[in-house]
Every structure is written in structure tokens, then in C-alpha cells.
Image (spheres, rainbow, N blue to C red):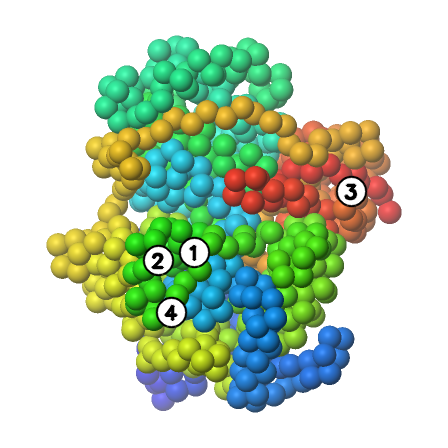
Amino acid sequence: MQRNFEKIVTVCPYCGSGCQIEFTVDKEANRIIEAKGAPGRTNEGRLCLKGFYGWDYLNDPQILTRRITSPMIRKGGKGSPLEPVSWEEAIQYTAERLQAIIKEYGPDAVMGAGSARGPGNEAGYMTQKFMRAVVGTNNVDHCARICHAASVAGLKQTIGEGAMSLSVPEIEDAEVILNIGYNGATSHPIVARRIVKAKAKGAKIICADPQISETARIADIHLQQKGGTNLLLLNALAYTIVDEGLVDEDFIKNHVNGYEEFAPKLAKYAPEAVASKVGVSAQQIREAARLYASSKHSVILWGMGITQFSQGVDCVAACSNLAMLTGNYGHYATGVGPVRGQNNVQGTCDMGLLPNEYPGYQDVTQADIRKKFETAWGVELSPTVGLKLTQVPEKVLEEADPKKQIHAYYIIGEDPAQSDPHLEELREALQKIDFIIVQDIFMNRTSEYADVILPATAWGEHDAIYTCCDRGFQRVRKVIEPPAGVKTDWEILCLLATAMGYPMHYNNTQEIWDEMRSLAPKFAGATYEKIEALGSVQWPCYEESMDDKGTMYLHKDGQFATADGRGNLVFNEYQPVKEEVDDEYPLSFCTVREVGHYSARTMTGNCRMLRQLEDEPGWIAMNPKDCESLGIEQGDLVRVRSRRGSLITRCLPTERAKEGATYMTYQWWIGACNELTNGVLDPKSKTPEYKYCACRVEKL
Ligand code: SF4
């Protein structure tokens, strides 16, 4: 007999491209039958392999047995086994432990990490509300800290708004694309498709990347620079634009501050002076600058290849400088695109999962803003900027005053013991924290340090809104019923808040969203109904009326989001990476992504299909000449060492890697490359220098 299958459209959880997926669902059997691309604004019916195959963990009976379906507590304290308990007991225990820590050390002894993955914007809003209104601290952050926090800071300095200025569909109408530190083919395949389409329509591509990435292969100019030279290169491009008279003088005069002071500071960055350090010819740099400046439809795209450095913020500001110098802001198919990695990392920033801002990028130190939130939430709020995620180890291991240490860590949908740098140091910190709550769908590497485990619904099991990389809000729909015993993240937060004496009750995510909208003017007009009707609404969207359909590109006509409406050119001197190669550690080491997996593999590592595509725990990609000099061949087991640790993996010789450089994916439990990475931080954004440290490779 023919069964009735339902079609449900939702949004892929695996990257900021924001692809819409249509699921065919057997509601009676509570099973997904198949997935195909839906005609979303950014994906136009296309999906990459993660979108097509990344959902079977929701159905698979064997994998479902691995889901956490009961809260757990270490009743015997640290070191004792986790034991299943009822929700009532888990919530009561967690509330009492948190309250005891707050009583003894104060609210700033608690750190909260929200999730940019499955839970969605409403859970993000609730996480920061819980930390601020219930715990009483601004110590709340999320994984943007370790990826694109530098983009937010660098763009805020220069143009006042930390988001992608253009839209994904506009990329294909650009005439020139400067792609720097970004390999869209592995991180955002459906965004990368727009680059390929732009090329097919006649755009010129400049790719700055030490690797011969997929984008480098189609580039008109490949600046195969040495790792860690981004700011040298960007300043040399700016120098050339000024030196060769390519500046858009009208745009500077009408819309930009600081040109007179900025231009002379570039003097020592002539391409001829820096080319040997950058590792590409002066002529190539000059040609790239001329090409970029030749169009009013030039776009700069970047990824973590510029943000995950100790000068990430300065590099982002330097990208923004190039766009201002050439008038490439404020009209169709131009601007800058920090292409956000995780599916909802733009959304978690939007929702105020940041230690310095409430939802809608409103400053916690500004009295009138704070008063607005105090009135709405009915409590006094902390006026002090909170701790950043990457400051947790130092606040545990180096802070002598117990009153200033972190004593409790609430981790929702993140796995710092896999994803954070310098894992040995992080493990030491996690061992010393008095009380750790892990809220997730599967046990992860951080679970072994947890005192409480709270099981949450997965993507596909709850409603939400995600924000994709170009500021687009989209509806995420419940596709199937969750396993018995789990709760949505926002329900768990409500239970915990209520047990701690701050009653929180919502009937659905729309009520949470409406409360958020009432407090964040940038998002006020983006109602559920409007997002439903239009499929996607890009912020800012101020008015509820359907006349306000949101904003395709920012800074229209050169009106920037700064106090005086003008952009600011910001010059920074180049500084070398913090750990250079030497005789003992002669190779550079850089983290990259595996296209078939996502983040710390909590979801994709539990997908049968994706595991079949790539289930070998890691490799180190090296130039064949380096392999030859070390006497190693493809597939050989090697030990990789840095000053912080070592691991065993297999050798992958590839011409993609520049001589002297090595690359590893960060997604595997075995051969976890964060054993090697350097925890040194950008002083402005506190983003780690994942993309460069020194290592050596030894044949086993
Ligand atoms: Fe689209 Fe990204 Fe999902 Fe691939 S992983 S289908 S590019 S949202």
C-alpha cells in the first residue's frame, strides 16, 4: 500500500552557505526517506555531499543507540562514573552546584559556551539570557571566538559592522574576486559554486593562498605566498593602489576618514621591498593590485586563512582598507565577505553570545542599552565585559586569586577538548574546573571532564531560525520526533533558570524569537511570518510590514555603520607569526578541513554515508620534495611533533602543499592536530593562531 510521505523544507546544519533541503519524511515511521536541494536563496536547489548525506544519524537504529537519552551525573564526584538520573534530579543538582559556586566566588566564576551548530538562534538567545539574567555574568561566548571574531573586530574598526557586506548570490556577478585565506571548495562548496559561476561569466580571480587550492586552480593570478605573510601582502596591495594612482578619490573624499595619515605609512610596503618575504614576485603583487582596483564590482572573500593568526584583526582591517581605497563598498556585487564557517555562527553572534554585546550587537557597557535589557528581563545586569572563550585556560591555570578563577563551565553543543588549540593545556584546565556541564547529542571528547551531561535534541528534531553567512534568517523545521528522554536546549535552559529562582516559560521558539526582536532593532522586522513567506530575510530588517524585506547589501551609497557614517582607514604594521620554523622544527603546520566532515564530527562522524566517504583518521599533507628528503612515501605512518605535543598520522604527498608547509584536518579524535597547534592569541580578538606553528615530521 502506498504510504503518505510528507515534504518538509529546512536548512542544512553544516556550513554558513545556508542551503535549503527538502526532506521526504515518513511521519508514521518517524523516518527520513530522502533529501534533495530546495530552491533556497543561496543554494538554488543545489547541495553538497554533506547536505545530501549528512542526516542518516537521525534515523539509523544502530547510531541512535549511541545518542545520549538520559541526563547523567557523577554522583561520586570527579573520577567516578557518570550515572543516569531523572531530569528532575539532574536539574536540581546542576542548579544547586551553580548556585553554590556563585555564592562562594561570585557570578563571574561561571563561564558559558553556546552553540553555533544545531540549536539555532532561539537557543542562542536563551543561553546568553541565562548567563546574564540568571547567573549574573557576561562570561558567555561561542566558537566565533576561534574562527571569525577577528572579522567582526576588524570590520567594526573600519566600517562599523562586522558582517558580510554583500550577499552570496551577488558573488557570481562580481567582475573581480580577491580570494584570500579561503578555500570555499572544502568549507562552503555551495558558496564556492558562485565563484566558479563568476569565472564562467567572465570575472577575474585573484587567489592568495600558500596551497594550490581549488580556487587557486581557476585563478587568473595565484599569489602562492608563504604562510603567515597576509598583512605584508595586503599592505603591499594597498601601497600599489596608492602608488599607481588607482585610489577612488571621490569615494575617499565623500565617505572615508584618515587617508592623509594612512597613505604615507605604507611607504615600506612597496612590492619590490617585501616580495621576497611574501614569496611571490613584485610584478605579481602589482598586477593583482591593478586588477582588483580596475573594477567597481570587486569583491574580497576570506576565511580562517586570515583570521586564525595572531594578527587576524589587522588583516581583516587591511582587506577593508582595500575596498575603501577603491570605492568597492555600498553597491551591488561589491564589498567584503568574511565567509562564516559553521551553519549558524553568524546567528550566535547576532543573538549576543558574546561577552561584550547583547542581541543585535548592543554594547553591555552602555547604560541606556543595559537599562533596556534590565527592564525587559526584570533583573540588574553586569556592566562588565565578560571573558572570552579562549581565556578559560589562563583563568584556570594562571590566575592566583580563587575569586577571579573560573570554577564552573557550561558547554552547550561544543567540544573544546577537540576543537581548541594546545590541547594539553586545555585538558589540564578542564581537569581543574570544579563543575562542568556538557549539553549535547552524543558523548564527545569534553564529556570525559563533565560532572553533568544533559541530553539535547539534534538538528532535525526541533524548530529554530538560523542566520547564514550573508545575514539571512531562515526557518529550520522539526523533521522527525526526537528520541524519548531528550529536551530542546531552550527547554533545558528554562528548567535550569526556574530551578535557580528565575522562572522562564515559553511555549515555543516563536515566543522566544518575538522577545528577542522586541529588544534588537536590527532584527525587529524579521517576523516568523515574513521569513516563512519570503524564505529568507537578511538583516537589518527594521519594520514588520512586508514593505521591509531586509537588506541585500550593507553600506548603501557609502553610508557606513560608524558614528559619523564614514569609513576609517586603519593602518597596522606587519608582525611575523609567533612561532617561526627553525632547525629543530623546520616545517610550518596549518589546520584545514576535510570536505566530507563538519567541525568536530559530532554529527557527520555519526553519519554512515559520510563515514564511508572519509573514515581514515587524518593525514598530514606535505610537498613531495619534503617527503623525499625525509624518506617517506604516501601512506607511511609518521610522528608529527611541535613544541606542545605530538601525534601519529599518515603521510599524504601532494603538490597542493608548498615546499616547507604541512596541513592537517582538525576533525579527528585520533591524530588530533590540536595537540600541536599554538594557543597564542590575537591580542584584539583573542583568536588563536591555528594556521601557523612550527613542526617536524619523523618516519616511524
Ligand atoms: Fe550547503 Fe554547506 Fe550544507 Fe553543503 S554543508 S549543503 S554547502 S549548507
| Disc 3 target residue | 643
Q: Quadrant of residue 225?
A: top right
In the rendered structure, find residue 383 and report the number of the disc placed on it.
1
**Which residue lies most toward the right here?**
700
Residue 408 at least partly seen = yes
Mark 4 belongs to which amino acid? Val
Q: Are marks 4 and 1 in contact (CB under 8 Å)?
A: no
Q: Could you tell me which secondary element the residue under label 2 belongs to?
A: helix
How packed is label 1: few (under 14 Cα within 10 Å), some, or many (20 or more)?
some
Q: Residue at x 29, y 60 (%)?
A: 372
Task: Give residue 102's position: percent from left, percent from top.
Answer: 56, 70
| Mark 4 C-beta to ligand 1 under 8 Å | no
Mark-to-mark CA distance, 3 and 2:
44 Å
| Disc 4 target residue | 379
Q: Nearer the viewer, residue 671 or 524?
A: 524
Mark-to-mark CA distance, 4 and 2:
10 Å
